[in-house]
Image: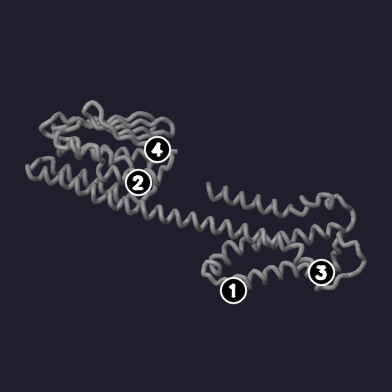
Amino acid sequence: MFKNTKIIYHLLGIILVLLIPSIIFPSLIHSHSIPTAFIIKDTVLVALLICFFYAHYHLIIPKIYNSKKYILYGVILIFIFGFLCSFAIPFKNLLPDPHVHSKVELSNLQYFLRELRQNFFFFIGVLFASLALKLNHQWKQIEQEKLNAELSYLKAQINPHFLFNTLNSIYSLALVKSDSTPKAILELSSLMRYVISESKEKFVPLEKEIDYIKNYIDLQKLRLDDTVSVSFTTEGEIKNKEISPLMLIPFIENAFKHGVNPEENSIIDIFLIVQGENLLLKVTNALVTRITDSFTKSGFGIENAKTQLSLLYPNKHSLTLEEANHCFIVTLKLNIS
């Protein structure tokens, strides 16, 4: 869809540029004298300038300018400009210029120099427009590549961090020879399949992300058994919505990592609601004794998630971390449009 729109914009721009002679000199269209020759000559010139624009954008800048062959670049531009002006010489006698009222015939050289003066600013305008658009496009590509590299680095940190915690959970089950160990391994296999297949994507269906969260919670329940009360509630329309993969799990993982103590009343409450293009995630876990002193500091996963939010959802999210009523509460508001 985006590519089709881009093509339409290009076609409209080309048509508009081709109409420049008639826009600048509308009286020539209705004239019954020879001035139509003027329109023909300038329309051909504009068509050649359009060809130059695309050749400069797609070929000359990438191959010559970006290779820092500036002398060759300058020579090519001079040659092209000279050609654009010299093409009009055959028109001198066949299609006389209506704006030349003098009966003194110009020589080919004089005609050529006059074309240079008349077309110089048009040529420079096309040149700089093409150069500016190309450099802007290249700058955006570089920024996108930097963003992708940083996101890949962050996701590479998330995956081992998640795997380490989950393997510890399964190890705990194996130590007590729990019958849940095989099921836990299958759950981990399902989770890792999602991590490997989907985490490379920039966005995934929200339904898949929620299924991933459910599988993660089920795996944690197998490890913790009845030592923690966990609730996960979703509301709203989640179909046809997308989100960056593994965007929500760090906040949920943090609750299981720091909010569970078998000797205390451990409660984790996860609430997710989607209203239109807005997503709200609220994760609440009880403060337990063993992490009371360090709870004001967010863990590695949360810090990582903050960075991803700033990169993927700039000015489209709000995140608050707070303690209230002996609970640690994470509230994330996200515009997923």
Q: Secondary structure at mark 1?
A: helix
| Residues packed near mark 2 inside 10 Å, few (<14), some (14 to 19) or many (20 plus) | some
Quadrant of residue 176 within the rendered picture: top left
Label 2 close to label 4 by CB (< 8 Å): no
Residue that label 2 marks: 307
- Does residue 315 appear left or right of residue 22 in this picture? left
Residue that sits furthest to the left in the current view: 176
Separation of disc 2 and disc 4 at Cα?
12 Å
Give the mark nearest the N terminus, 1 or 2.
1
Q: Position of residue 316 (x, y in %)?
A: 42, 38
6 relative to 70, above or below: above
Separation of disc 1 and disc 4 at Cα?
49 Å
Separation of disc 3 and disc 4 at Cα?
63 Å
Residue that label 1 marks: 72
Separation of disc 2 and disc 3 at Cα?
63 Å
Q: Nearer the viewer, residue 87 or 298?
A: 298
Q: Position of residue 244 (x, y in %)?
A: 37, 44
Q: Secondary structure at mark 4?
A: strand
Q: Position of residue 24 (x, y in %)?
A: 78, 51
- At label 2, the amino acid type is Thr
- Does residue 163 appear left or right of residue 62 in this picture? left
- At label 3, the amino acid type is Tyr
279 relative to 190, above or below: above
Q: Position of residue 232 (x, y in %)?
A: 26, 31
Q: Secondary structure at mark 2?
A: helix
Which part of the image, by quadrant, shows the C terminus? Answer: top left
Residue that label 3 marks: 111
Residue that label 4 marks: 317
